[in-house]
Image (spheres, grey):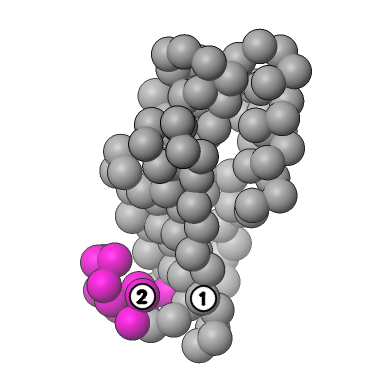
Amino acid sequence: MQYYVSVLHDNAKTFKQDQGADQCVLTAAGYQEFYNGYPETQSECGEQVSFFDNLTITDEMKQTDLVFIENNQYSMVGYGSDESPAALIAGKCYAYYRLDGKGDDGHSFKVDTSRC
């Protein structure tokens, strides 16, 4: 995930989309909203609503407790029986993405799959 976002950011810089207001950029996963060249956590481009929306949800996943949490501050996906960030973190099977400082300071990831 970190590599993918780095590639997207470099691509945004190449096309002079790394400064200024929100922009919709076509990526391999569809349109994604960017701010200062980093993908937003909550897309308003119409096709995606989450940083993790490009994950393919299989029938097996639908039969489990796969949880997506999304707001303007972070995106999170993981396995758990409770749809709260604290529960997913405690379950130690999650991926978390946050756009820091509206793009000025980059982005951060937390991934813990030790109990998956």
Q: Earlier in the sequence, mark 1 or mark 2?
A: 2
Asked whether the residues under the numbered discs 1 and 2 touch, taking CB atoms below 8 Å apart as contact, a structural biologist would say yes
Residue depicted at 38% across the width and 82% down the height:
91
Position of 75 relative to 22 (above/below):
below
Mark 1 → mark 2, Cα distance in angstroms: 8 Å
User: What residue did someone put label 2 on?
Assistant: 89
Instruction: Tell me the tag on residue 112.
Output: 1
Residue depicted at 41% across the width and 57% down the height:
76
When asked about the image quadrant of residue 18, the answer is top right
Position of 2 relative to 50 (above/below):
below
Q: Is residue 59 left or right of residue 102?
A: right
Magenta span covers which residues? Answer: 79-90
Residue nearest the observer in this picture, 34 or 32? 34
Residue nearest the observer in this picture, 59 or 36? 36
| Mark 1 secondary-structure assignment | strand
User: Where in the figure is residue 2, as x and y percent of width and height?
Assistant: 64, 52
Q: Is residue 27 left or right of residue 84?
A: right
Q: Within 10 Å of the Cα at label 2, are there few (<14), some (14-19), or many (20+) other Cα atoms? A: many
Give the mark count. 2
User: Where in the figure is residue 28, as x and y percent of width and height?
Assistant: 71, 33
| Mark 2 secondary-structure assignment | helix
Instruction: Name the kind of residue labelled 1 in the image.
Output: Asp
Report if residue 26 lies within the magenta region. Answer: no
Residue depicted at 47% across the width and 13% down the height:
20
